[in-house]
Amino acid sequence: MHISEMFRLIRGTGHILDVLDVLHRDRLALRIHDGAFSAMDLTARHPRTGELLFTVKFMVQTLAAAGELQRDLQRELTYDGLRAAEAKGNKGGRRPAVKAELVDAVRTAYLEGRSIAALARDHKVSRGAIRTAVADLLPDYTAADPGAPPPETPVVLDMPGKVADFLRAAELEPAERVTLDQGVTVRRGQGYTLRVTAVPAVHRQLLDRCQSLDGTAAVPAQRKARREYENRVNALGAHTGS
């Protein structure tokens, strides 16, 4: 059995020993690729009794307790950040789109000279939602070339919370910022992921924006989150044929 790090498999200090017992019962080897457990042989047992070695049990329980404490602290920091953002008026989740029955009215108002910002305030949606509704009426709109390849289809991709936090503080292009703002926050145990819907090109642009998370200035958790995000974007490119 291969896992990226121990806490992908276990829920806490008590659960880890139960998992090791099940693996031993089913004669399964366990390989952990990252984290404090990656250099340990968690299957080492006494040759006569078959019980988990005391030294292994002690190290596993100690490291698991430390990891559980770290996750709890990260969860508290994440919630504090979300509460601070909400206090400033920033709400998570996807902003509403223009309702289908109101699209014609929005388009008519835009043709009559109503600004995108004013329409966004009137309908309580983002400016991006208004631009989508009136896309073919915008001055820079260009009709598609019949011989051109079809446009990319938006796809959904889960972005690790640490990557999303970094990008929110980065300088982004308007389309990238709108894409990030419209992401849906999904709780994942001690943290969260941001479910982002965009065309593959925008996903790749956002990945490029967080390139610095691979540097030495980033903490290990950020580097790991960036690698996970890169793997998802690369897999996305393979599936879309890009």
Image: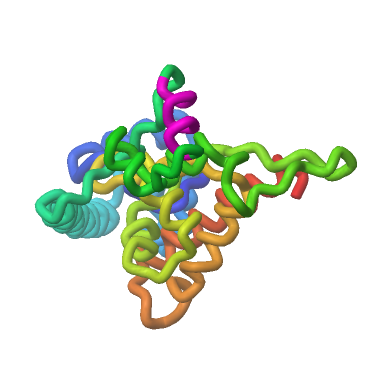
Outermost residue toward the right?
147
Outermost residue toward the front?
112
**In this rendering, would 111 be left or right of 187?**
right
Relative vertical location of residue 168 with respect to residue 137 in this rendering, above or below: below
- Please state the total of marks drawn on the protein image: 0
Q: Give the range drawn in magenta.
A: 102-110
Overall secondary structure of the magenta section:
helix
| Residue at point 40%, 32% (across, down) | 97
Q: Can residue 50 be seen in this view?
A: no
**In this rendering, would 200 be left or right of 30?**
right
The image shows residue 186 at horizontal and vertical percentages of 32, 38
Relative vertical location of residue 183 with respect to residue 203 in this rendering, above or below: above
| Residue at point 37%, 81% (across, down) | 217
Relative vertical location of residue 174 with respect to residue 240 in this rendering, above or below: below
Outermost residue toward the bottom?
216
Q: In terms of image quadrants, where is residue 143?
A: top right
Outermost residue toward the top?
101
Q: Is residue 230 visible?
A: yes
The answer to if 19 sits in the magenta stretch is no
Out of 185 and 17, give the one closest to the viewer: 185
Out of 206 and 137, give the one closest to the viewer: 137
Relative vertical location of residue 83 with respect to residue 174 in this rendering, above or below: above
Out of 11 and 151, give the one closest to the viewer: 151
| Residue at point 44%, 45% (across, down) | 128
The image shows residue 212 at horizontal and vertical percentages of 46, 75
| Residue at point 34%, 41% (across, down) | 120
Q: In terms of image quadrants, where is residue 69?
A: bottom left
The image shows residue 102 at horizontal and vertical percentages of 41, 23
**In this rendering, would 221 be left or right of 153?**
left
**In this rendering, would 143 be left or right of 109?**
right
